[in-house]
């Protein structure tokens, strides 16, 4: 298996998922496809703060899944192999952590400047760095959509994302 993901490059190796990896893949797949992590939040919808919070919550969900299934999802002796644990932690640390480390404090600093008389939604939309943040979220969304596709395949599930979701095959990602 070769997987190419924005932020991470190519992850190549053999992946012969064990039962625990298939179950863990399904659980993380459900977490991904039911959030704005892979479905774009339109400019006139909600708050970007909520999108960042949703992405941040993936750390807790992934940790819980990793603890639940234990070392069986990242076994010793499979250094050249792709594992659920390696892929999940790679996406967290390679794609989400840098995005959140940059944008959580930047957005918080802007939010702290909101005058009492200004609506939080309008204040966020007035931020001059919002387009840059949206572009960063779009890049992360491509990586997470690719991960969702891989997880669906491993779990033996249909790819349930809406048709307007970034197509991993057309976004520089892919599985072979």
Image (spheres, rainbow, N blue to C red):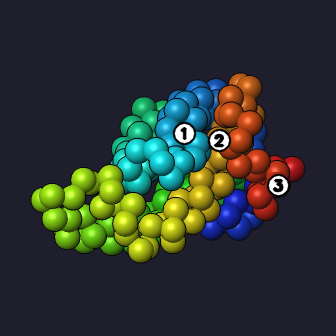
Q: Residue at x 67, y 64 (%)?
A: 6
Residue at the image position 20 percent from the left and 65 percent from the top? 114
Give residue 148's mark. 2
| Front of the two marks 2 and 3 | 3
Helix, strand or loop at label 2? It is helix
Q: Are marks 2 and 1 in contact (CB under 8 Å)?
A: yes
Q: What is the C-alpha distance between the residues marked 3 and 1?
A: 19 Å
- How many numbered tags mark residues here? 3
Q: Secondary structure at mark 1?
A: helix
Closer to us: 83 or 156? 156
Judge the density around disc 1: few (<14), some (14-19), many (≥20) Cα neighbours within 10 Å.
many
How packed mark 2 is, by other alpha carbons closer than 10 Å (few <14, some 14-19, many 20 or more), is many
Which one is earlier in the sequence, the residue at label 3 or at label 1?
Answer: 1
Identify the disc placed on residue 170: 3
- Residue 76: give x, y in percent of width and height: 58, 51
Q: Nearer the viewer, mark 3 or mark 1?
A: 3
């Amino acid at each position: 298996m070769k997987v190419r993901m924005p932020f991470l490059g190519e992850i190549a190796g053999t992946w012969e998922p064990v039962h625990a990896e298939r179950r863990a893949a399904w659980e993380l797949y459900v977490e991904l496809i039911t959030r704005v992590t892979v479905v774009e939040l339109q400019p006139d919808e909600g708050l970007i703060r909520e999108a960042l919070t949703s992405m941040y919550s993936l750390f807790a969900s992934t940790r819980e899944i990793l603890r639940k299934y234990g070392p069986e999802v990242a076994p010793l002796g499979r250094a050249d192999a792709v594992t659920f644990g390696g892929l999940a932690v790679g996406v967290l640390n390679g794609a989400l952590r840098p995005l959140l480390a940059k944008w959580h404090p930047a957005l918080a600093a802007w939010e702290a400047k909101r005058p009492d008389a200004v609506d939080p939604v309008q204040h966020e939309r007035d931020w001059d760095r919002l387009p840059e943040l949206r572009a960063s979220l779009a890049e992360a969304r491509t990586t997470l959509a690719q991960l969702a596709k891989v997880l669906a395949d491993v779990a033996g599930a249909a790819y349930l994302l809406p048709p307007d979701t970034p197509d991993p095959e057309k976004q520089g990602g892919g599985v072979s």
